[in-house]
Image: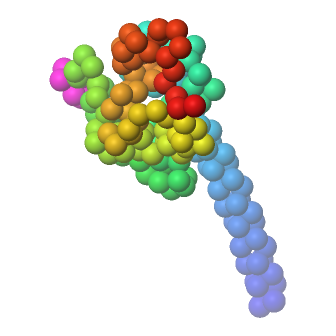
Amino acid sequence: MKELLKKMKSKVFLFTLIGVFIGIVFLAVTEGAINATDTPEFCASCHVYEQTITHFENSNHAALNCNDCHAPTDSKLAKYTFKGINAVSHGYKTTLGASSLPDVIHATEKSREVIEKNCISCHEPGLENVSHDMKDGCISCHRQVPHNKGDFRPKEWFEPGNFHFNK
């Protein structure tokens, strides 16, 4: 009987060890895949916007990944859930629903909320210097940043002595 218990304990230990190893490998692969899907290169594989990617890579935001702005940053759970839902939606639209893809893809209301929150979380330290009312939020005017979707600034901003910030 002792011999049987000893064999069972060694098998349990072996299976536990194998399970832990498989778990570590799974987590490493999953984390790597999740990080890879944050990059502009990955996003550009479906969103065929060469000009947009080129402009992004030359912008002040080039050090960021797409999901630093386009996914929640509060927690990994919120980010991964949001990314998972969007992955299913994007996957469907770029494969089965490809005939109905619009020329210009617009962010959903939920995506706009996430982007707005991420703008504020990064730029909050400088917001007290902004010279205009931000009641409509950042992306109502700055939606082209960093994707070069047109210039929102009036010509007078470029005249000498005119600045967009309070002194």
Q: Residue at x 54, y 36 (%)?
A: 129
In reply to whether residue 54 is colored magenta, the answer given is no
Residue 152 point in image, percent of width and height: 36, 18
Q: In front: 81, or 166?
A: 166
Residue 161 point in image, percent of width and height: 53, 14
Taking the image as shown, residue 124 lies to the left or right of residue 50, namely right
Above or below — where is 110 with respect to 13? Answer: above
In reply to whether residue 97 is colored magenta, the answer given is yes
Above or below — where is 39 with respect to 52? Answer: below
Q: In front: 9, or 110?
A: 110
Q: Is residue 80 visible?
A: no
Which residue lies most toward the left here? 100
Above or below — where is 71 with respect to 105? Answer: below
Q: In front: 99, or 44?
A: 44
Residue 147 point in image, percent of width and height: 44, 19
Q: Quadrant of the N terminus?
A: bottom right
Residue 124 quadrant: top right
The number of numbered badges drawn on the structure is 0
Q: Residue at x 69, y 53 (%)?
A: 24
Q: Quadrant of the C terminus?
A: top right
Taking the image as shown, residue 15 lies to the left or right of residue 52, namely right
Q: In front: 76, or 9?
A: 76
Q: Is residue 164 visible?
A: yes
Residue 136 quadrant: top left
State the extent of the magenta-drawn residues as a range.
95-100
Which residue lies most toward the bottom here? 1
Residue 72 point in image, percent of width and height: 47, 47
Q: Residue at x 80, y 81 (%)?
A: 6
Tell me which colouring the rendered structure shows: rainbow
Above or below — where is 44 with respect to 115? Answer: above
Q: Residue at x 41, y 34 (%)?
A: 132
